[in-house]
Amino acid sequence: MCAMKYGLLFFVTLMATNLVSEADGDLMSMIDYRYFRCVMKREWKCPDSEINFFMYTPEHPRKHFIDPRYPKLLHDFGWDPMRKNVLIIHGFNGTYSKSPMTFIRDAYLSRKDYNVFMVDWSELTRFPCYLSALSNMKKAAQCTAQLYSAITQAGALAKMITCVGHSLGAHICGMISNHLTEKQYKIVGLDPGRPLVSAYGSRQFRLGRDDAHVVHVLHTNAGFLGESGLVGHADFCFNGGQKQPGCKGHIMRIARCSHFMSSCYFAASVRRSRRLVGIPCDTSCPKERGYWGINPQRRAVVLGDDVPDGSRGMFCISFENTEDCPFD
């Protein structure tokens, strides 16, 4: 009975990794030795050599390795205490140095008013190690909380720090507050990851509106690779929430493309190259075809930094995307 239980869990894990992998491949390509090279952290000490942080500034767009134990060195690398700060966290089988995370980084740098920090936990979230990646999220959040504290020790106000995470990275953003004396001010979750998270994740494990004073969430593959329904204080359901224009191919390719479009849409809103207007609608996402439940009694908002902190509820955004948004 025990062997059957763990055999089933192994199969479910393989199927989950097939859903959220960034690379194409069939089931047989996953049943190989790589699965048994997965890393699962069991020591809860930070810093950790497999969780790294890099800082970028408008004047110094090349990366600087950051050791959170030495917050005073931030100034030596060009950190400006008068600027806002953003922490960007990738998801499963991702990395800080590939698209679309680099689109978000470059969008913030183009504004000239942000210090940008990239969180790299790629060694702990490699394909096909989805279950171990779920376990390693706690360690990634703990060590990133140390970075967050270093930024505040250097002189930044909590209100000037935003955590932006894609997929599992969105949940890590939420978990950071578990390791702080005061919860964060703002989190942006980009299509927060769903496979196995919704089934096994406790409240402390998943992004929710209690994790920061302001939590905004973008839905682009809701109910499949991404969480469904109202997750934050203000959620944005794009084009019905599940399948995005321009995403083509087989069903898994369409799902992955739609999942990553949340990062591309958000990068466009940060650059202000796209005016993405959210119309108040009911709290469901994904939406039934042809029915969004528009609520004309509430005000529309423009996605990006201009979204009022007091915005509440679900907002629907509809537009035909014509921009190419590749992901590595």
Image: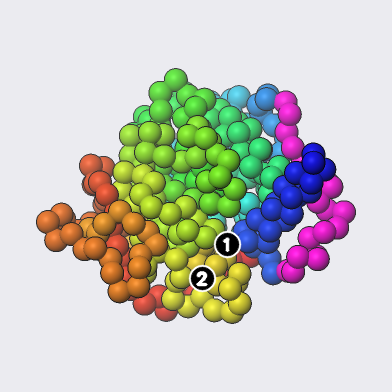
30 sits left or right of 314 in the view: right
Residue 134 visible in this rendered orientation of the protein? yes
Residue 155 position by quadrant = top left
Task: Give the numbered dot on residue 99.
Answer: 1
Indicate the quadrant containing the C terminus: top left, top right, bottom left or bottom right.
bottom right
Q: Residue at x 49, y 27 (%)?
A: 178
User: In the rendered view, how is the structure colored?
Assistant: rainbow
Q: Residue at x 74, y 50 (%)?
A: 8
Which region is colored magenta? 25-43
Residue 124 visible in this rendered orientation of the protein? no
Residue 197 position by quadrant = top right
The amino acid type, in three-letter code, at marker 2 is Cys
Relative height, residue 304 to residue 117 (above, below): below
* Dot 1 and dot 2 residues touching (CB under 8 Å): yes
Q: Which residue is mark 2?
A: 325
Q: Residue lying at the far top in this picture: please name it.
A: 181
53 sits left or right of 299 in the view: right
Q: Residue lying at the far front in this picture: please name it.
A: 1
Q: Residues within 10 Å of mark 2 (few under 14, many from 20)?
A: some
Q: Position of residue 27 (x, y in %)?
A: 76, 65
Q: Please, what secondary structure does the residue beneath circle 2 have?
A: loop
Q: Position of residue 244 (x, y in %)?
A: 45, 71
